[in-house]
Image (tube, rainbow, N blue to C red):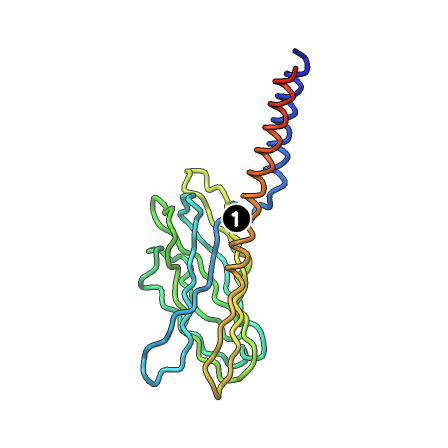
Amino acid sequence: TMHKIFSVYFTTAILALSFSAVPQSVFSADLTFKVIPNTEVGDSTTIIEVRIDPQSKKLNVVEGAIGFSGPASDNLAVQVENGQSILPMWPTAPQYDKTQKVVNFTGGIPNGFDSEGLLFRLRLSPTLSGDLYLTYQNGSAYLNDGKGTKEPISSQPLKIQVNKSAQNEAVQDSSGFFNFKYAIIVLLIVFLFITFYYVQRKNTKI
């Protein structure tokens, strides 16, 4: 009947609109900052792992910059270690530019990767107290699809509260964003189920 045909088109339209309304960051690759406890005696440096989760997509290139800001970024010493990186090739190896307060990098891997892994580690040695922010800037990745398709990367900043007379404290906001992303997906699934159930009931009555 005409009503059933309309119901099918209505359900299809709702599905399309619902998925288009979900932020792109829900499905994009994730770059995260992970604070690693420093167990070396007499070493006060803060160790940060910069990690990438392709969200099951196959990536072969990751690029961008890690920017440093805040009062504790002045006269900051940063050592970069990429020997255990998931990316073996570095057209632009990650190095800290003290003038620009940034680590620029471009790394790649033949045939790509589709699981979460380490990009590189940062050893931070602040000389001043105050807040220190790490932010992923101007970054993207490329899919291993033979076309060089660009893939956006989402990331949340890391805030480190530097206290030269006490233990530094790192505050990460990425976990809340992670939970928010999956909450959106769950709500979307519930909404689609309710809509489909309602349409099916209307069809059954007719």
Q: Is mark 1 on a helix, strand or loop?
A: helix
What residue sits 60% from the left and 33% below the top?
194
> In the displayed structure, does residue 77 sit left or right of residue 71?
left
Q: Are there few (<14), some (14-19), or many (20+) residues within 10 Å of tag 1?
A: few
Quadrant for the C terminus, please: top right
Q: Compare residues 123 and 161 and report the one nearer the observer.
A: 161
What residue sits 38% from the left and 58% below the top?
90
| Residue 156: quadrant of the picture | bottom right
Residue 163, position in %: x, y? 51, 83
Q: Compare residues 166 and 157 and report the one nearer the observer.
A: 166
Residue 69, position in %: x, y? 57, 72
What residue sits 41% from the left and 46% below the top?
59
Quadrant for the N terminus, please: top right
Q: In this view, does 65 lie above or below 30?
A: below
Q: Is residue 184 above or below residue 171?
A: above
The residue identified by callout 1 is 182
What residue sits 33% from the left and 77% below the top?
39
> In the displayed structure, does residue 77 sit left or right of residue 74?
left
Q: Compare residues 54 and 88 and report the one nearer the observer.
A: 54
Q: Compare residues 93 and 66 and report the one nearer the observer.
A: 66
The three-letter amino acid code for the residue at tag 1 is Tyr
Residue 192, position in %: x, y? 59, 34
In the image, farthest residue toward the bottom: 165
